[in-house]
Image (spheres, grey):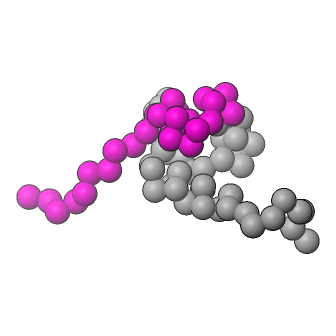
Amino acid sequence: MSNTTHRQMLRTQGAAEYLNLSVSTLNKLRLTGEGPSYIKLGKSVVYDPADLDEWLSSKRRRSTSVAA
């Protein structure tokens, strides 16, 4: 038996809900390359929740001023 952990991937709708974004916004972020990493399986797009968490962490800010 394999000791591999099975990770549940999220389709776009689930990922959008996880991130509290609309599906349209998540699609646009994917199109521009500004969104979280995703996996393409045939015609399906899926997201690993660990990648979503990493992307959210990268958006963490301490100030509203523009970074220099």
- Residue in the picture at 54% in, 46% down: 38
Whether 63 is drawn above or below 21: the answer is below
- Residue in the picture at 8% in, 58% down: 1
Image: magenta residue range: 1-25
Whether 61 is drawn above or below 33: the answer is below
With 47 as the anchor, is 56 left or right in this view?
right
Return the residue found at the far bottom: 68
**Which x, y percent locates residue 8?**
34, 44
Whether 54 is drawn above or below 36: the answer is below
- Residue in the picture at 66% in, 41% down: 30
- State the count of labels: 0
Can I make out residue 27 in this image? no
Residue sitting nearer the eye, 34 or 18: 18
Can I make out residue 19 in this image? yes
Return the residue found at the far left: 1
**Which x, y percent locates residue 35?**
66, 47
- Residue in the picture at 67% in, 62% down: 60
**Which x, y percent locates residue 47?**
48, 44
Quadrant location of the C terminus in the rendered image = bottom right
Q: Does the magenta stretch include residue 36?
A: no
Q: Is residue 18 magenta?
A: yes
With 64 as the anchor, is 39 left or right in this view?
left
**Which x, y percent locates residue 28?**
71, 35
